[in-house]
């Protein structure tokens, strides 16, 4: 069984509903083990768009990394994701942050996520559920990465109940 951490994000329409639907679809090909709180941040990269909601989930799955990527991209597509503008507005974005302790570097998949340590909106929810997880490339725990993160983007924890 593979242990995987996914970042879910949305900044279009009913953002909370998109993420809940994503979790429900992911639960058809994986077991959702943990979920972080939901956090709100301004857009990162391309800033002239609505704020994002983000959260991290830990899943266990029999999917290989390639099969998981396929299932995630299919989930995004089914839930209205359109890839027209890099870092653009979207109903749903799902990133594979970690896949076990593996380092994957292919044309279609890079794990750990290459920007993970640079993005506070990723580290805050990840730290909530996996602060002692060690990044296999940089050799530091998630909690330490958050402590050292230079990203000054404000990340606000939303007051909602967890779904799982």
Image (tube, helix red, strand yellow):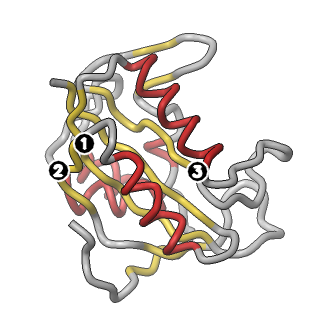
Residue 116 point in image, percent of width and height: 46, 42
The one nearer the camera, 67 or 34, is: 67
Residue beneath label 3, please?
A: 93
Q: Which residue is drawn at 69% across and 50% down?
A: 81
Q: Does residue 119 sit above or below 15 in this rendering?
A: above
Query: Helix or strand or loop: what does disc 2 sit on?
Result: strand
Q: Does residue 67 sit above or below 83 in this rendering?
A: above
Q: Contact (CB < 8 A) between labels 1 and 2?
A: yes
The one nearer the camera, 35 or 140, is: 35
Upstream in sequence: badge 3 or badge 1: 1
Name the side, left or right, on which 47 lies relative to 134. Answer: right
Q: How far apart are marks 3 and 2 (CA)?
A: 20 Å
Q: Does residue 83 sit above or below 3 in this rendering?
A: below
Residue 74 point in image, percent of width and height: 57, 36
Residue beneath label 2, please?
A: 33
Residue beneath label 1, please?
A: 59
Q: Residue at x 37, y 56 (%)?
A: 24
Q: Distance between the residues labelled 3 and 1?
A: 16 Å
Q: Which residue is drawn at 57% across and 35% down?
A: 73
């Amino acid at each position: 069984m593979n242990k995987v951490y996914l970042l879910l994000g949305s900044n279009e329409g009913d953002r909370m509903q998109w993420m809940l639907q994503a979790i429900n679809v992911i639960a058809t090909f994986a077991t959702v083990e943990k979920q972080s709180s939901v956090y709100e941040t301004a857009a990162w990269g391309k800033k002239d768009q609505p704020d994002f909601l983000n959260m991290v989930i830990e899943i266990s799955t029999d999917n290989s990394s390639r099969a998981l990527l396929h299932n995630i991209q299919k989930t995004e597509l089914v839930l209205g994701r359109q890839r027209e503008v890099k870092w653009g507005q979207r109903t749903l974005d799902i990133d594979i942050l970690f896949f076990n302790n593996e380092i994957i570097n292919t044309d279609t998949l890079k794990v750990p996520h290459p920007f993970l340590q640079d993005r506070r909106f990723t580290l805050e929810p990840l730290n909530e559920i996996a602060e002692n997880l060690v990044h296999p490339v940089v050799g530091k725990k998630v909690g330490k990465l958050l402590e050292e993160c230079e990203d000054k983007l404000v990340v606000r924890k939303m007051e909602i109940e967890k779904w799982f």
